[in-house]
Image: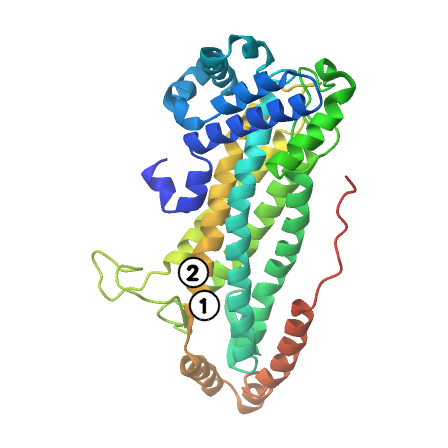
Amino acid sequence: MSIFEGFLSTTETLAAFDDRSFVDAMLRFEAALARAQAAVGLIPESAAQSIVGSCKVELFDVARIVRESSRAGSVAIPLVKALKEAVGLFNADAVAYTHFGSTSQDVIDTAMAQVTRNAMAHVEADLSRAIDALLDHAVQHATTPVLARTLMQPASVTSFGFKCAGWVAPLVRSRARLRVAKANALNVQLGGAVGTRAQMGDKGGDVMQRMADDLGLGNARATWHTQRDEWIALGCELGLMVGALGKIALDISLLGQYEVAEVMEPSEPGRGGSSAMPHKRNPVASMVALAAAQRTPQRVAALLGAMPQQHERALGAWQAELAEWPQLLMSAHGSVRALATALPGLQVDVARMRANIDRLRAELPKDAADEWFNPALAQHAGRLTIEQIEHLRKPSNPIKERTR
C-alpha cells in the first residue's frame, strides 16, 4: 500500500484487503466447498478432509501466488494449482475433487464478499459512533445561537443543534440503507463454468446453501457472475455515506477557519500541527473525509461503468470492478473513522458564535438586525431540532429486504 494511501484509510480495512487476508478467504471458500460437496455425496469424505486440511494460508507462498496471477489472468488460477499440489502431498486421489464444479470467479467473488463483510463491520461501528456524537451535540446545542450561512455569506440566526441535526440525518438514513444493501450483496458465488452448476447436477443448490451457512454469507439462489446490481448497490450506498460525511467535514473546516473560529476539531499533541507555522490547527479529520469525498465518486462511477458485462462471464469489466472495490472500502472507512474519532470531542465556541452574531448586528440598521439577527431565533430552531432528533431516534420504517 502506498505511503500516500495509508493515512487516508485505516489499519483494519487495509488488513482486510491485503494479499494474505484475501488468499485466506479464497481458501475458506475451497474448504467450505469441499465440506458441502462431501455432505451431499458429490465427493468422498476422505477427499474433503484432505482438501480442508490443506486450506491453511500458512502453507502457501502468498507472494508467489500474487506474482503468478498477472500471467494467469486471475489470482484463483495459481491458488488452485498450489492447493492441488498441497492436497496431492497427502492424498493423491483427492486432487481430482479439489475445486470440483467451481470456477475462478466463484472463488474470488466469495472471497471478496468475506473480506468486505469484515471491513463493513468496522464501517458500521464507526458510523454509529459518528451518529451518536452528532445526536449528543444536537441535543446539547439545540438552542445555541449561530449564524446560518447561505451562498457562503452570513444569512440569519439558527441553532448549532439544528445544524448538527441536519448533519446527522443523512447518516442515520445511510446506516439503515447500508444494512439492507449489505444483506442483499454479501452472498456466496457458486455457478461453475457458465453459471449453471452443471457438474453438481441437482445437488448444486444444496451445496450453495451449505456453503452460505458455513461461511456466514447469504444465498442469492442464482449465480450473479454478470448480474452485479446488488453488489454495486452496496458500493453506491457507500458512496452516498462518504458524500454525507464530506458535507459535514466541509462545514466543520469552514467553521474552524481562524476568521470564523466557531467550531474546532479536538486538539492533541502530534495532531493537526504545521511544520512551519506553530499557530496553525489543521482540521485533519475533515481533510481525510474530504479526500475520500473527492475520490469516491470516481470509484462508484467505475463500478457503475463496469456493470455492462459480456454474456455469462465478463472480459475486462469484472476485473476492473475488482480493482476499484477495495479502494472504495478503504476510502469509505477512512472517512467515517476520521469523523467518528473527531466528532465526540468537537470544540464548540458558544461565545464566539454569539460574538459573530453581535458583530453583524452592529453593522446593520436596527430593524433589520432585530428581525434577522436576534439570537432568540435559535429558540425556534431548537424546537425543530428536538423534533428532528426524536424522529431520528425512533426506528425508521423498515426497508424491505429482498426475499431470498
x, y (%) of residue 386? 64, 78
Other-residue count near label 2 (Cα within 10 Å), few / some / many at <14 / 14–19 / ≥20: some
Residue at the spot x=41%, y=69% of the render?
345
Q: Are marks 1 and 2 in contact (CB under 8 Å)?
A: yes
Helix, strand or loop status at disc 1: helix
Q: Describe residue 273's horizontal placement relative to residue 77 as left or right.
A: left
122 and 27: which is toward the camera: 27
* In the rendered image, the vertical position of residue 26 relative to residue 185, given as above or below: above
Occupied quadrant, residue 385: bottom right
**For mark 2, what is the residue?**
341
72 and 37: which is toward the camera: 37
The C terminus lies in quadrant: top right
The N terminus lies in quadrant: top left
Q: Which mark is residue 369?
A: none
Helix, strand or loop status at disc 2: helix
The amino acid pointed to by label 2 is Thr
**For mark 1, what is the residue?**
344
Residue at the spot x=37%, y=67% of the render?
266
